[in-house]
Amino acid sequence: MDILKIAVLGIAGALLAILLRREKPEYSIFISLSVCICIFVYIITKLSTILDFAKRLEEALPVDSRYIMLLLKMIGITYIAEFAMNICKDAGYAAIGNQIEIFAKMTILVISIPVLTVFLETISSMI
Amino acid sequence: MSVNLIFKIAAVGILVTVICQVLKHSGRDEHAFLTSLAGLLIVLFWILPYIYELFETMQSLFAL
């Protein structure tokens, strides 16, 4: 199955990166970046099936499609921020990684403001 | 497709390390630095299209 492929790919990449860590650390970061990208290509196939299921679910449920799009956007932002943050932390620069993480949290908060306003309006209309 | 990219990068890394060691021990440090810089640029130009493609698919997938 392809989980074995992913595991072998990750271990091979890690060993190659360790080989070059002492002499040339920049190449170990390049290798870890390329292994992440390879594994991401496999993630995309899984992700597109989940997204199709989410779209089908969206028609079935009476939920407003705007919220599902917001949810997708948040997932996308989180994944990209996580990817960049981990690469920076691997390179040893945790400060940059944390800045990226804080920026991602702020963007998600900004995106979820309309949802919060609608929520508050429904609450106040009920009381 | 991108699996042999990893081994290409590892090969360039090992090659540049060996060349730099040889150049350092023969006293030409600036050549060693230039070779490692050249190796770095080559690998960067290999990886950049993949990163661009990664972020393109992310944008199209998540409608960012």
Image (spheres, helix red, strand yellow):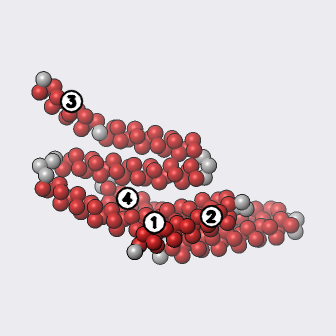
Specify the quadrant of the image occupied by residue A20.
Answer: bottom right
* Residue B30, numbered label: none
Q: Dot 3 corresponds to which residue?
A: A120
Q: Amino acid at mark 4?
A: Met
Label 3 neighbourhood size at 10 Å, few (<14), some (14-19), many (20+)? Answer: few
Are the residues flagged by discs 1 and 4 in contact, CB closer than 8 Å?
Answer: no
What residue does disc 4 label? B58
Where does the image place residue A124, in percent across and percent down from the top left? Answer: 16, 25
Q: Disc 1 versus disc 3: distance between alpha carbons?
A: 41 Å
- Residues flagged by tags 4 and 3 on a common chain: no
Disc 3 secondary structure class: helix
- Badge 4: chain ID: B
Q: Is residue A73 visible?
A: yes
Same chain for labels 2 and 4? Say yes or no. Answer: no
Identify the mark nearer the N-term, 2 or 3.
Answer: 2
Residue nearer the viewer, A37 or B64: A37
Note whether residue B48 is visible: no
Chain at numbered mark 3: A
- Label 4 vs label 3: CA separation? 32 Å
**Residue topped by disc 2:** A17
In the rendered structure, which disc, 1 or 3, sits on the residue that comes first in sequence?
1
Q: Chain of mark 1?
A: A
- Residue at left offset 55%, top offset 67%: A11
Q: Label 2: state its secondary structure.
A: helix
Question: Given the image, on which type of amino acid does mark 1 rest?
Answer: Ile
The residue carrying pointer 1 sits among few (fewer than 14), some (14 to 19) or many (20 or more) residues within 10 Å by Cα, namely: some
**Which numbered mark, 1 or 4, is in the foreground of this view?**
1
- Helix, strand or loop at label 4? It is helix
Q: Chain of mark 2?
A: A
Query: How far apart are the alpha carbons under marks 2 and 4?
Result: 26 Å
